[in-house]
Image: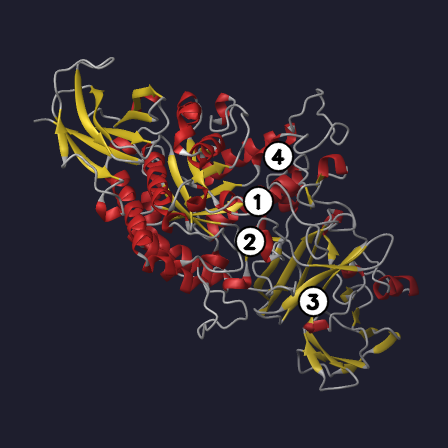
Amino acid sequence: MATFRKYTKDNCAKIVNFENINPFDILGPHYIPEKKEYFINCYYPNSSEVTIIPGVESRKPQKMKLIHEAGFYQAVYKEVKDTFDYKFSVKYDEGYPLELHDPYSFGTDMTDFDLFLLGEGNYFKSYEKHGSKLKTKNGIKGVEFAVWAPNAQSVSVLGNFNRWTPGSYPMHNKNGSGVWTLFIPELREGEVYKYALKPWQGDIFYKSDPYAFKMEMRPKTGSVVTDIDRYEWNDKGWMDKRAQSDFQKNPISVFELHCGSFKRDYYNTEFPNDWGFLNYRQLAKEVVEYVKRMGYTHVELLPVMEHPLDQSWGYQVSNYFAPTSRHGSPEDFMYFVDYCHQNGIGVILDWVPAHFPSDEHGLANFDSSQLYAYKSPKKGYHMDWGTYVFDYGRNEVRGFLISNALFWLDKYHIDGLRVDAVASMLYLDYSRKDGEWEPNIYGGRENLEAIDFIKKLNVIVHEYHKGIVMIAEESTAFPGVTLPVYLGGLGFDMKWNMGWMNDILTYFSKDPVYRKFHHNLITFSLWYAFSENFVLPVSHDEVVHGKRSLFEKMPGDAWQKFANTRLFFAFMFGHPGKKLNFMGNDIAQYNEWNCDASVDWFLLEHDFHKKLNLMVSDLNRIYKDNKALHSVDFKNNGFEWIDFSDAENSIIAFMRKSEDGKQFMIFTFNFTPVVREQYIFGVPFEGYYREVFNSDALEYGGSGVGNSGGVHSAPEQRYNHGNSIRVNLPPLGANIFLYETE
């Protein structure tokens, strides 16, 4: 119970005018032992009458005295030996009276240690206390709210329960920390709410909860009270195995997808909506069926965190702790992850700690100041995206972001995070002209605060969750992105190889007659392939905004386009590095990705598309079944050139080797439509080289030029090898040979 301050008009005015930092000093029960008096104050705006209903039969209901016409009431009990329980009967001009427990007769669970950790930037599970939490206090169920808004003059909770009246149910600024708390009894799950914040100057404004676990369906922006701890997981086997796994030695082939456009159903009777969205549970069945058939090991979801604009694809996040309501509830999303795990499929989320949008209900100017962003526009605003940059130097913001990363790994069993736009975090002059950015304390362009944040993030998430992967979408040559923090690196597990992606797509877009002049594009990536732990991405960014689909990037007539696409995939699966493909790539979709429509799955009814899709499935199988293709992805002892010198004929060949040296496979590539018969390659051992893959096979839609299942070596010197094989290289084709002793 708060220390009683004797009622004065000034105290009453602070409540009515929504200006009090600690409403518990005025509202609620106040017992004065020496006077044996019990004061009870309450504030119910626009009410016509309030009556106290004691919880003991010895005391009779008492009509409270109206102190202020705005709805401030007081009751005094004299000759009282102790406190007692009570309710308010609140009457409005319309409807029946409401019987309500007094929020100011309950304490809150935010501790001084919580506040200390928040200020220190080490409150890594702040989601357990902040936001709205269903709780039971003194046998009464309700919801406890907590929000960080240090620059606000006052904060209150709004909802149907108080007729969305700002100033009603004012919150308490805990120890002046800037964290505002309040327990409101009798609220239930499903309650929609917001926070009303009053600045020291200016008008009251309204914000959704930064820690909300659920949000209303856009365009509505209310937060929703929800319990995310009752879901019963069935993925213990997966989680135990993951904790013991080594991603570096495991096959990782990722299917990247956007939940809103993987498939749409405008006649969805199970989950009716106007946009054709599937529920997370429906998506689980559809996605898993496809991904298992294709042989992918993981799915990567474009951001599922709540976002106001569909066309942002989720990359402009407004509510970091809430899976978007476009596809159902938090439990529905848990089911999606759980179902994937039960079917042996990992789930990676795109995560966006680089920026956030300027929507009024979100983090922007949260408490009338740029609480979450750098205050200077030269550091705190992305002109390209029209978004704000997080203040990585502020402890509370760093804690918020690290807590959010842990939240998805903890509560949703996510297997990894692909961190978006890392380059924009690392460099203060990212996409800025001279004079538009501020150098660091040493005069350099590196954002030292962001670098420190990233290192801390990667250390913490790996301490809490064994076996998860952190992947950087980083497009520059910043050193040590995947080097451990203790060795001076950023601590990511893997990095997208944007250089490989740009070079290879540029090369494949060339007419084969000109490829000999650009041979370096196909070989250059191997000069730096082992400088980082790379993922080879062909992502959503490469098949949108006029860049054309993967299939339409290829030159030539329809047959050559299919042949080139098959050749592209074969090169990708042979090249060192983990793999990532965006939906639609593996069916040779003609159209660019459209976030407002479904993937063109009907193409699989057509022969060439079906056959290319089969080929990608077979490549995934070969990739997973052969250690030579995945056990040494990040070291040069798993790769060896056989021939990279034949630029004139646009032919290359290389070898992939397993970590134990017991298996090796030879890849040959002919990047022209000309058949090369009996082409000679050096090989390291005498024996039989079985042809385990031919992208020109008839079953893949090719012309059928091949090597009748394999070739025998001959003791013929070729470059560095004393043995050689003579093979037929199909037009725009790739072959894989597995060495077998005779």
Instruction: Find disc 3 in the rendering and name its residue.
Output: 103
First in residue order: circle 2 vs circle 3 = 3
Viewed as shown, does residue 539 lie left or right of 450?
A: left
In the rendered image, residue 465, in percent from the top left (x then y), is placed at 43, 41
Residue name at image x 29 percent, y 55 percent: 607
Helix, strand, or loop for circle 4? helix
The amino acid marked with disc number 4 is Met
The Cα–Cα distance between marks 2 and 1, rounded to whole angstroms, is 9 Å
Instruction: Find disc 4 in the rendering and name its residue.
Output: 425
Give whichever of 107, 465 is nearer the camera: 465
The Cα–Cα distance between marks 2 and 4, rounded to whole angstroms, is 20 Å
The residue mark sitting in front, 3 or 1, is 1
The amino acid marked with disc number 1 is Val
Tell me if label 2 and label 1 are in contact, CB under 8 Å. yes
Tell me if label 3 and label 1 are in contact, CB under 8 Å. no
| Label drawn at residue 305 | 2
Determine which quarter of the picture holds residue 21.
Answer: bottom right
Tell me if label 4 and label 1 are in contact, CB under 8 Å. no
**Image: 740 above or below 527:** below
Tell me if label 3 and label 4 are in contact, CB under 8 Å. no
In the rendered image, residue 638, in percent from the top left (x then y), is placed at 30, 25
Residue name at image x 74 percent, y 66 percent: 169
Determine which quarter of the picture holds residue 352.
Answer: top right
Give whichever of 605, 264 is nearer the camera: 605
Neighbour tally class for label 4: few under 14, some 14-19, many 20 plus, Cα within 10 Å: many
Give whichever of 609, 478 is nearer the camera: 609
The Cα–Cα distance between marks 3 and 4, rounded to whole angstroms, is 43 Å
| Label drawn at residue 250 | none
First in residue order: circle 3 vs circle 1 = 3
Instruction: Find disc 1 in the rendering and name its residue.
Output: 352
The Cα–Cα distance between marks 2 and 3, rounded to whole angstroms, is 32 Å
The residue mark sitting in front, 2 or 3, is 2
